[in-house]
Amino acid sequence: MTAKPGSLERFAQRLRQQPAFMAYVLQRVMTYERIDEEQLAMRLGISLANLTRLALCKRPRPEPEHFSADVQAITKYTGANPTELMRILRTLDTLEAFQEGLPAQPIAEPGEEAAAPHPALQPGLMAARDRAEEEEEYKAGGEAPEEETPNTQAEP
Protein backbone atom coordinates (compact mmCIF):
# COMPACT_ATOMS: atom_id res chain seq x y z
CA MET A 1 0.00 0.00 0.00
CA THR A 2 2.40 2.59 -1.28
CA ALA A 3 2.01 6.01 -2.89
CA LYS A 4 1.75 4.42 -6.35
CA PRO A 5 -0.19 1.23 -5.68
CA GLY A 6 0.33 -1.91 -7.70
CA SER A 7 -2.40 -4.36 -8.60
CA LEU A 8 -2.38 -6.12 -5.21
CA GLU A 9 -2.60 -2.83 -3.34
CA ARG A 10 -5.48 -1.65 -5.56
CA PHE A 11 -7.30 -4.92 -4.98
CA ALA A 12 -6.75 -4.62 -1.22
CA GLN A 13 -8.17 -1.08 -1.33
CA ARG A 14 -11.31 -2.37 -3.06
CA LEU A 15 -11.71 -5.03 -0.37
CA ARG A 16 -11.98 -2.32 2.30
CA GLN A 17 -15.72 -2.27 1.64
CA GLN A 18 -16.07 -6.06 2.04
CA PRO A 19 -16.59 -7.11 5.69
CA ALA A 20 -15.43 -10.67 4.97
CA PHE A 21 -11.83 -9.50 4.40
CA MET A 22 -9.08 -8.23 6.66
CA ALA A 23 -8.82 -5.09 4.48
CA TYR A 24 -12.17 -4.05 5.94
CA VAL A 25 -10.98 -4.77 9.48
CA LEU A 26 -7.74 -2.85 9.02
CA GLN A 27 -9.44 0.17 7.46
CA ARG A 28 -12.08 0.38 10.19
CA VAL A 29 -9.45 0.16 12.93
CA MET A 30 -7.20 2.74 11.22
CA THR A 31 -10.18 5.10 10.96
CA TYR A 32 -11.22 4.53 14.57
CA GLU A 33 -7.71 4.89 15.98
CA ARG A 34 -6.81 7.68 13.51
CA ILE A 35 -3.61 6.03 12.34
CA ASP A 36 -2.21 5.41 8.88
CA GLU A 37 -0.97 2.24 7.20
CA GLU A 38 2.64 2.78 8.25
CA GLN A 39 1.66 3.12 11.90
CA LEU A 40 -0.54 0.04 11.70
CA ALA A 41 2.20 -1.98 10.00
CA MET A 42 4.62 -0.90 12.72
CA ARG A 43 2.17 -1.99 15.47
CA LEU A 44 1.79 -5.36 13.79
CA GLY A 45 5.56 -5.68 13.32
CA ILE A 46 5.32 -6.10 9.54
CA SER A 47 6.28 -4.29 6.35
CA LEU A 48 3.79 -2.42 4.16
CA ALA A 49 4.02 -5.29 1.64
CA ASN A 50 2.98 -7.75 4.34
CA LEU A 51 0.22 -5.36 5.45
CA THR A 52 -1.14 -5.72 1.91
CA ARG A 53 -0.90 -9.51 2.23
CA LEU A 54 -2.79 -9.26 5.51
CA ALA A 55 -5.47 -7.07 3.92
CA LEU A 56 -6.05 -9.71 1.23
CA CYS A 57 -6.76 -12.43 3.81
CA LYS A 58 -10.28 -13.42 4.75
CA ARG A 59 -11.35 -12.55 8.26
CA PRO A 60 -11.00 -15.30 10.85
CA ARG A 61 -14.16 -17.30 11.31
CA PRO A 62 -15.86 -16.22 14.55
CA GLU A 63 -16.62 -19.70 15.85
CA PRO A 64 -14.32 -20.58 18.78
CA GLU A 65 -13.25 -23.87 17.18
CA HIS A 66 -11.91 -21.99 14.12
CA PHE A 67 -10.90 -18.53 15.34
CA SER A 68 -7.49 -19.31 16.89
CA ALA A 69 -6.43 -21.55 14.01
CA ASP A 70 -7.45 -18.89 11.48
CA VAL A 71 -5.55 -16.16 13.34
CA GLN A 72 -2.51 -18.43 13.57
CA ALA A 73 -2.64 -19.14 9.82
CA ILE A 74 -2.91 -15.41 9.04
CA THR A 75 0.01 -14.51 11.29
CA LYS A 76 2.12 -17.30 9.81
CA TYR A 77 1.34 -16.07 6.27
CA THR A 78 1.94 -12.36 7.00
CA GLY A 79 4.41 -12.35 9.91
CA ALA A 80 2.05 -10.16 11.96
CA ASN A 81 2.30 -10.13 15.73
CA PRO A 82 -0.51 -12.48 16.85
CA THR A 83 -1.25 -10.56 20.06
CA GLU A 84 -1.60 -7.27 18.20
CA LEU A 85 -3.71 -8.87 15.48
CA MET A 86 -6.04 -10.30 18.13
CA ARG A 87 -6.30 -6.83 19.72
CA ILE A 88 -7.23 -5.34 16.34
CA LEU A 89 -9.87 -8.01 15.73
CA ARG A 90 -11.34 -7.50 19.21
CA THR A 91 -11.38 -3.73 18.69
CA LEU A 92 -13.43 -4.18 15.54
CA ASP A 93 -15.74 -6.68 17.27
CA THR A 94 -16.38 -4.08 19.96
CA LEU A 95 -16.99 -1.31 17.43
CA GLU A 96 -19.43 -3.47 15.50
CA ALA A 97 -21.27 -4.46 18.68
CA PHE A 98 -21.72 -0.82 19.69
CA GLN A 99 -22.75 0.23 16.20
CA GLU A 100 -25.38 -2.48 15.80
CA GLY A 101 -28.61 -0.71 14.98
CA LEU A 102 -26.96 2.67 14.39
CA PRO A 103 -26.98 4.34 10.99
CA ALA A 104 -24.12 3.14 8.77
CA GLN A 105 -21.13 5.44 8.60
CA PRO A 106 -18.93 5.45 5.52
CA ILE A 107 -15.37 4.27 5.92
CA ALA A 108 -12.82 6.95 5.14
CA GLU A 109 -10.40 6.23 2.33
CA PRO A 110 -6.69 7.02 2.74
CA GLY A 111 -6.13 10.77 2.76
CA GLU A 112 -9.78 11.52 3.63
CA GLU A 113 -10.85 12.93 6.96
CA ALA A 114 -12.70 10.34 9.03
CA ALA A 115 -16.26 11.17 9.97
CA ALA A 116 -16.91 11.91 13.62
CA PRO A 117 -18.17 8.83 15.47
CA HIS A 118 -21.91 8.52 15.99
CA PRO A 119 -22.95 10.26 19.26
CA ALA A 120 -23.96 6.91 20.76
CA LEU A 121 -20.31 5.84 20.57
CA GLN A 122 -19.34 8.72 22.88
CA PRO A 123 -20.92 7.60 26.18
CA GLY A 124 -19.00 10.14 28.27
CA LEU A 125 -20.79 12.94 26.45
CA MET A 126 -24.25 11.39 26.47
CA ALA A 127 -25.19 12.15 30.08
CA ALA A 128 -24.31 15.84 29.80
CA ARG A 129 -26.10 16.14 26.50
CA ASP A 130 -29.21 14.35 27.81
CA ARG A 131 -29.39 16.68 30.79
CA ALA A 132 -28.88 19.79 28.65
CA GLU A 133 -31.60 18.64 26.24
CA GLU A 134 -34.01 18.07 29.15
CA GLU A 135 -33.34 21.55 30.52
CA GLU A 136 -33.87 23.15 27.10
CA GLU A 137 -37.14 21.24 26.70
CA TYR A 138 -38.23 22.50 30.13
CA LYS A 139 -37.40 26.11 29.20
CA ALA A 140 -39.52 25.67 26.07
CA GLY A 141 -42.55 24.70 28.19
CA GLY A 142 -42.04 20.96 28.63
CA GLU A 143 -41.85 18.88 31.81
CA ALA A 144 -39.26 19.72 34.43
CA PRO A 145 -36.20 17.48 34.36
CA GLU A 146 -36.11 14.83 37.05
CA GLU A 147 -33.86 15.70 39.92
CA GLU A 148 -31.65 13.01 41.32
CA THR A 149 -31.83 13.10 45.07
CA PRO A 150 -28.90 11.71 46.98
CA ASN A 151 -29.66 8.87 49.37
CA THR A 152 -29.05 10.44 52.77
CA GLN A 153 -30.52 7.65 54.87
CA ALA A 154 -28.06 5.43 56.64
CA GLU A 155 -28.16 1.73 55.86
CA PRO A 156 -29.43 -0.41 58.83
Image: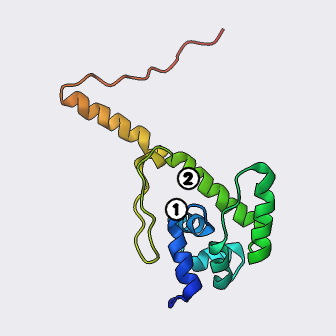
Q: Is residue 145 visible?
A: yes
Q: Is residue 1 visible?
A: no
Q: Above or below — where is 110 with respect to 122?
A: below
Q: Position of residue 46 (x, y in %)?
A: 71, 79
Task: Mark 1 and mark 2 in contact? Answer it, CB < 8 Å.
Answer: yes
The residues bearing labels 1 and 2 have C-alpha atoms spaced at a distance of 9 Å
Quarter containing the N terminus:
bottom right
Q: Above or below — where is 2 with respect to 29?
A: below
Q: Using the image as rendered, state which of residue 134 and residue 68 is in the foreground.
A: 68
Q: Using the image as rendered, state which of residue 139 and residue 78 is in the foreground.
A: 78
Q: Which residue carries the number 2 mark?
A: 95
Near mark 2 (Cα within 10 A), the count class, few <14, some 14-19 or many ≥20, is: some
Q: Position of residue 47 (x, y in %)?
A: 68, 83
Q: Residue at x 80, y 73 (%)?
A: 76
Locate residue 36 relative to residue 59 in the image: left or right. Answer: left
Q: Residue at x 54, y 71 (%)?
A: 15
Near mark 1 (Cα within 10 A), the count class, few <14, some 14-19 or many ≥20, is: some
Locate residue 50 relative to residue 152 in the image: left or right. Answer: right
Residue 32 is marked as 1
Q: Amino acid at mark 1?
A: Tyr
